[in-house]
Amino acid sequence: MPVDSKDITNPAALHQGVALPAQILPAGAVAPDFSLPYAVGKCMSLSDYRGRPVVLAFYPADFSPVCGDQLALYNEILEEFAHYKACLLGISVDGPFCHQAYAKSRSLEFSLLADFEPKGEVARKYGVYHHAWGVARRALFVINAAGIIHWSHLADMDVSPGADGILAALAEL
Amino acid sequence: MLRSLPIAPRPELKPPPGVDDHWTGSIGPAVELVMFGDYQCPHCKAVDMVLRELRHRLAVPLRIYWRHFPLAKVHPHSRDAALVAEAGARSGLFWPLHHLLFDRSPDLSREKLLEYAAQTGVDPNQMSNCFSDPLLAARVRDHIKSGVRSGVNKTPTLYFQGLRYNGGNNAAALEDAIVAAAELATDSSEAAGAQQNMDAVDPPVNGGGLS
């Protein structure tokens, strides 16, 4: 039974008049839809992927060491995600020009979404915005083909979470 | 005194070290260190150098295992280097070639790789078609799958006694981690020994005698 994200929100935490989750959205919650730039002047929506699993990887910042390790790992094992017909999307508060430079420098072959303006709005909806640092926390979501969160994981900011949890969750779908 | 390793969270190594793994170091009870690495990765090269030195300097029994985890999209020679190392293993020369690959890294073009294999005495027949040999490719792929399942999160990623190590990779940190793992192993084995002694002197709950 899907959990409506409004059931787990903290009414005191309002952003632009919308109640936001006080903590990372758990398994069973409806994945909030969003539309974000994946390149300069081009946007994609989560709902575009309805019908197939989606892996959302929120990370703090382009060009940071731990994020580099994490994304390089995912880039290397895209075939493992493809085995489950899953689409991997990286999300940070960096802008599309920054993402473009980062993806090119690391030869990344998956989309990086710019949660740039309003800053961190999507991260806030998923309960993974780091207010003190002004960045997305390092967090992972596996969303099923119906748009329901099947698995979520909040990792340490300074330790890459690897891919074992993601693949185990995809295998369960 | 027990010392805790800086390893939280600690995903488990899957599968545990086995007969098919490349290993070097102590035979018998020892600290087991498994390294997932990439021959073109400068951090892996640095750790390999440190481990070579520590293995000879520390009095701790240490057994080092290697599994391939080439990040070929950022290190274009890394997969080829892994294949060459595997081909070298067929001649029983995995470790000499392994160390030479790191000594020469990042100069790892195909031409150079074959030259390094020849320098270590690998039979040239073992090297023919090594870049397209499906068995070698499958072995490297199996290592990568093991790494992914085990929570490898960068190169190098190390596992002590089957658990991921999240600490630093400099010489001092690794020395501390090896010594700490040895102490934990000793404490565990002493505790197990003490329990065995307790089992020997304590009668079973049900008395073990007349009932």
Image: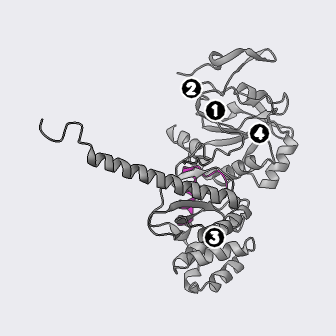
Q: How far is mark 1 from mark 4, CA to CA? A: 26 Å
Start-end of magenta stretch: B139-154
Q: Position of residue B128 (x, y in %)?
A: 58, 81
Q: Which mark is residue B52?
A: 3
**Earlier-in-chain disc, 2 versus 4:** 2
Amino acid carrying label 2: it is Gly
User: Can residue B76 be seen at all in this image of the molecule?
Assistant: yes
**Relative image position of residue B79 (x, y in whole percent):** 65, 66
> Label 1, on which residue?
A50
Residues at marks 1 and 4 on the same chain: yes
Q: Disc 1 or 4, which lies upstream in sequence? A: 1
Q: CA distance from mark 3 to mark 1?
A: 51 Å
Q: Is residue A83 left or right of residue B29?
A: right
Q: Residue at x 56, y 22 (%)?
A: A2
Total count of labels: 4
Pointer 4 with pointer 3, Cβ within 8 A: no
Label 4 environment density (alpha carbons within 10 Å; few <14, some 14–19, many ≥20): many
Indicate whether B52 appears above or below B196: below
